[in-house]
Amino acid sequence: MLKDSLAALAGALLIAQGAVALAASTVDLSVKGAITPSACTPSLSDGGVVDYGKIAAKDLSPSGTTLLPRLSLQLTVDCEAQTLFALTGRDNRLGSSIFPALNHMYGLGMVSGNVKLGAYQIGVFDPVADEPVYPLYSSDQGATWLVNSFGSYMGHYHWTAFGDTPTPKALRNVKVDLRFLTEIARVQDLPITEEMPIDGSATLDMIYL
């Protein structure tokens, strides 16, 4: 009888240990978010095309990178109601910038297979909204916001928003100038005997805060 009782007790302990092991092998997850009652629509002037035309190789700087003329587009964001939002850029030519360590520089594509043609940055200037605002940026997905004191830009991996303090404001309409500063790589690094297409491409994403 004692032997049977010990066997039953051992079996119960094994079952209990198994239950503990099962409990320790589980993890909870949550699915969160919100359905916003209003939506925003971004649009760009000139069909979103920054066109430098054809540039003669002889006009490139012989001693360093070449700065191209500064061009601009106007970005307009129209919302159905006052809405908290931010914008972020995605470089569709990621890995082709001649300044790979700088997150605000976008690539211009590759030439001759693996040669980086140059880079460009997107400056964010002179926003006009329902009320006076200035550009803000966040490098930690909106946890903190800063005023860009060394020149506003829309970097990939950064969020850009607008406010009158270092906190985004809910706005209905915003117009802002996007200024493009473009650099071509050094002549000695380029295959200048062939035509080299400038092939920058980026996507601007809306983020609802």
Image (cartoon, rainbow, N blue to C red):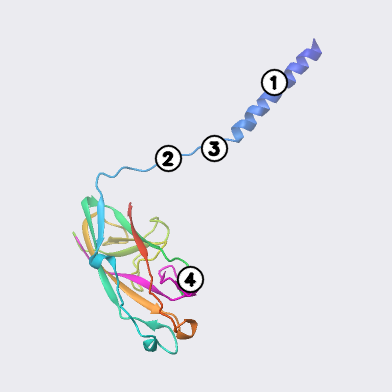
Q: Is residue 176 visible?
A: no
Q: Position of residue 10 (x, y in %)?
A: 74, 21
From which residue to which does the magenta span run? 102-129
Q: CA distance from mark 3 to mark 4?
A: 38 Å
Tag 2–tag 4 contact (CB < 8 Å): no
Q: Earlier in the sequence, mark 1 or mark 4?
A: 1
Q: Earlier in the sequence, mark 3 or mark 4?
A: 3
Q: Earlier in the sequence, mark 2 or mark 4?
A: 2
Amino acid type at mark 2? Val
Q: Determine the secondary structure under disc 2.
A: loop
Foreground mark, 1 or 3?
3
Q: Which residue is mark 3?
A: 27
Amino acid type at mark 4? Pro
Q: Determine the secondary structure under disc 3.
A: loop
Residue at the (81%, 14%) spot, across then down: 3
Q: Position of residue 187 (x, y in %)?
A: 45, 85
Q: Tag 3: Cα neighbours inside 10 Å, few (<14), some, or many (≥20)?
A: few
Residue at the (23%, 66%) spot, across then down: 45
The disc at residue 100 is 4
Task: Point out the image quarter for the N terminus.
Answer: top right
Tag 1–tag 4 contact (CB < 8 Å): no
Q: CA distance from mark 1 to mark 2?
A: 37 Å
Farthest residue to the front: give it.
Answer: 194
Amino acid type at mark 1? Ala
Q: Earlier in the sequence, mark 1 or mark 2?
A: 1
